[in-house]
Amino acid sequence: MKYLFTHVLLCLISVVTLIQPVSAQQQVDTEKLNQFFTQLEDNNRFMGSVAVLSGDEIVFEEAYGMISADGIPATPESVYRIGSITKSYTATLIMQLIEQGDLSLDTTLNSYFPDIPNADKITIEQLLRHKSGIVNITNLPDYMTYFTEDTSREEMLARIQSAGTSFEPGENTEYSNSGYVLLGYIVEEVSGQPYAEALQEMIVDPLGLNSTYFGEGIDPELNEADSFTFQQGDWQPATRTNMQVPHGAGAIVSTADEVAQFYKGLLSGELLSEKSLEQMKRFEGPLGLGLIQFPFNDKTLIGHNGGIDGYRSNSAHYPEHDLTFAILGNGINYTFNDILIGLLSITFGNNYEIPSFEERTAISPEQSALEKYAGTYSSPNFPLDIVLFTDGSNLMAQATGQGAFPLTVYDVQTMAFEQAGIELTFDDPVDGRYRGFRFTQAGQQFDFVLQKDSE
């Protein structure tokens, strides 16, 4: 459900800008927004949909790029996988069931799944806050062996059970997709219906949404967007997660407009009582109950982010000006945080210069040449090893316990994973092998050295 370095629990959106005063009736510079995203699209940096609401009015809604390998263009009605934004919907369903008196924040997990370790101690609230201690199965190496395959609820429960716990409930905070998979199952247990039906009845229908549902396969002919990664100078189809795997942690699909409408409706009190909403908004650090606080200069927005396959998403509401935005990307070849900075800077009327992109031409070395980079590299200042290996004509990188991602080769010493703003700069080869590289991302640099057992 995520790439290392790319799916960040909290997008720390901070940039030095001249803040201009903004009224509650802010006029969004939609022309500049379109220029920004068109520039990204024209330079193969972004594909996806964007929506901005002012109050209940859609003030900006555009789509960029394609939704299929054969070039079907994206439209504002295109439907995207929203990844972990699903957690806000799952948390809302749980809070609605609590309001109905069917469970409480103090209900323990053993009421539903007693075989999960510490089930008698783990509460609904701890699951919602990522404080359960249940190990996040998407971080385990074997996740990559089954995430695209058909799976059952029983199989997922067995995986979560065998993964165990990493701390006692309430003692720490650790982002856990596993916890939200269980919460999705609890929605089914308590409501007596499949998650998809509970979502439709309790959120979609009350808000009048038309294109928000539990995802299954992807059919571009139905305006469902496939996702892509940028490899060797072109967009290539990404993996397709079987949506029964993420379930309540990441299985919802929607449009940018409808995701924005969801957060606007939720945070305006259309789905929950004031008491329940305040419980969701009681933040410990950045985390509430299925919600995340995002800082942007002097502002704090409330929403969530997401990442699954080649999709990246973010949506949040700024109550002081009644502004809501959503961005659903199905092709990212640029640091997503920088895209968010551009979107929010323009939306809030800050001084912002649309970036120009230096053209770099990718090369396609023979596999025999790529083998010279292969091996396991480590850094004394970085907690994970990085393994480089060939996959056909591609050079891949994979950090300990994480999914592999493709590297674009620009010259014999420079390669990058643009989607996460990662660049690797290699030392001169010794005896025909590259012995180390400098890893750069977001201004941070780490020097990696080839381990001896890889020589």
Image (tube, rainbow, N blue to C red):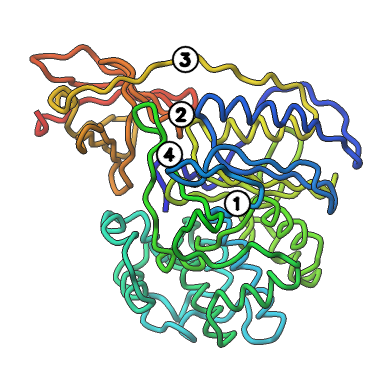
Residue indicated by mark 3 = 359
Residue indicated by mark 4 = 5
Say few, some or many: other residues with alpha carbon within 10 Å of mark 2 (under 14 / 14 to 19 / 20 or more).
some
The three-letter code of the residue at mark 2 reads Gly
Percent across and percent down for residue 180 are: 50, 66
Q: CA distance from mark 2 to mark 1?
A: 26 Å
Percent across and percent down for residue 40 are: 58, 28
- The residue nearer to you, when weighing 204 against 269, is 204
Q: CA distance from mark 4 to mark 3?
A: 24 Å
Mark 2, secondary structure of its residue:
loop
- The residue nearer to you, when weighing 388 against 393, is 393
The three-letter code of the residue at mark 3 reads Glu
Number of numbered discs: 4
- The residue nearer to you, when weighing 374 against 392, is 392
Q: Image quadrant of residue 407?
A: top left
Residue indicated by mark 2 = 421
